[in-house]
Image (spheres, rainbow, N blue to C red):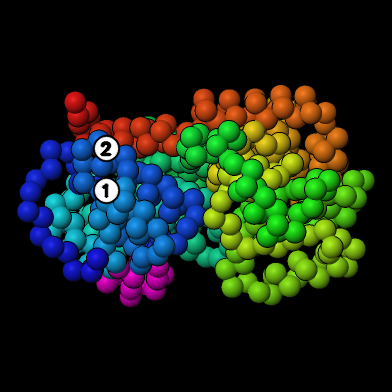
Amino acid sequence: MNATPEPATTESAYPVVLQVLPALDGGGVERGTVEITQAITRAGGSALVASAGGRLVHAVERGGGRHFTLPLDSKSPWRIWRNAAALTRLILAQRVDIVHARSRAPAWSAWLAARRTGVHFVTTYHAPYGEDFPLKRRYNAVMAQGEIVIAISHFIARLIAARHGVPAGRIRVIPRGVDPALFDPGRVATDRMARLAKAWRVEDGHPTIVLPGRLTRWKGQGVLIEALARMTNRAACLVLVGSDQGRARFSAELAALAARLGVAARVRMVGHCDDMPAAFMLSDVVVNPSIAPEGFGRVVIEAQAMGRITIGTDHGGAAETIEDGVTGLLVPPGDPAALAGALDAALAMTPAQRAAMGEAARAAVQARYTTAALQEATIAVYRDVLGNLAAPG
């Protein structure tokens, strides 16, 4: 849809919510946007999304939303200012009630537009944004300007309060969620797993360790390769699932590390995967070895929903979603020796031990981390900022 908004022709009985983010190419922020689009539509509201576009635009539209294309993926101050003007026009034309910003550069544009039009402003604080140069905290602070600031974990909630002085009454912790019907071990046919095993060159009899996530240093792929080389289990195969997003130099660095440590034949870098439920079912262990704390880490709960053994680093969101020794294993960040020990321990479990941990993990996800819970809590935030708007029905 073009950036030029069409005038709204009817009034909705429930709010018009505009979500704003850089693009819709994929990732946790983008999937969350689609999920909330679906929730707004089901609640009787109008769901609008503004971004630079991407492969998930059709998912927004299938969910009942309307997409408006704007260059919101730019961090240029000039472009942020221009985007603010475009969002102002969009808000007025579409009679928007709430603007929900999900990323920093577009959030600045959205905040300016909300101030100009007097509409409600909500933010989701997704990550422990870096502060590695002057004025970075000021740049990040826009994510703490929402009337209600949604934190995706208790870790992020504490960070918001400490960095930005946001009072507890304005912070709402809403964890990310998974659809337990989609991520259901009973729904993954063996032929889906067989196709992946063939594409990834994973052979029977070789335990499979899977790390899903884009190839970037802080995700910990290098630490995991070092751990693989230290393991006593010499049959295990490591599959790195995720795009390098143009970081060819880092991909080459990982390949060189595997070669230097003598494990190149047991490491696969397979790129993006469109069937993650099957990928998890193909794995014996799923690892989230980030060396910097993640805001949440949706990969962990997706793997747990599939009943897989998960190993994560003991910081950030993973420390909340993994109960050490019960629903998974936790290791210190950046410690390949500890990670190797945990991997060997996981692969040495008896079938009964593995099944018990997998069942406990899936039960924890169903109780705390579902898409439905995320959607319901976010709709409640919208109602709160509008003065406790009554639910439809």
Circle 2 residues within 10 Å: few <14, some 14–19, many ≥20: some
Where is residue 269 shown, x and y percent of the image?
70, 63
- Verify CB contact (< 8 Å) between mark 2 and mark 1: yes
Say which quadrant the N terminus sits in.
bottom left
Reading the image, the residue beneath label 1 is 64
State the CA–CA distance, disc 2 to disc 1: 9 Å
Viewer-side residue, 243 vs 140: 243
Residue type, label 1? Gly
Where is residue 141 shown, x and y percent of the image?
42, 54
First to last magenta residue range = 70-82
Reading the image, the residue beneath label 2 is 42
Where is residue 368 shown, x and y percent of the image?
51, 28
User: What's the mark number on residue 101?
Assistant: none
The answer to whether residue 299 is left or right of residue 135 is right
Count of numbered labels shown in the rendering: 2
Which residue appears at 25% of the width and 55% of the height?
A: 66
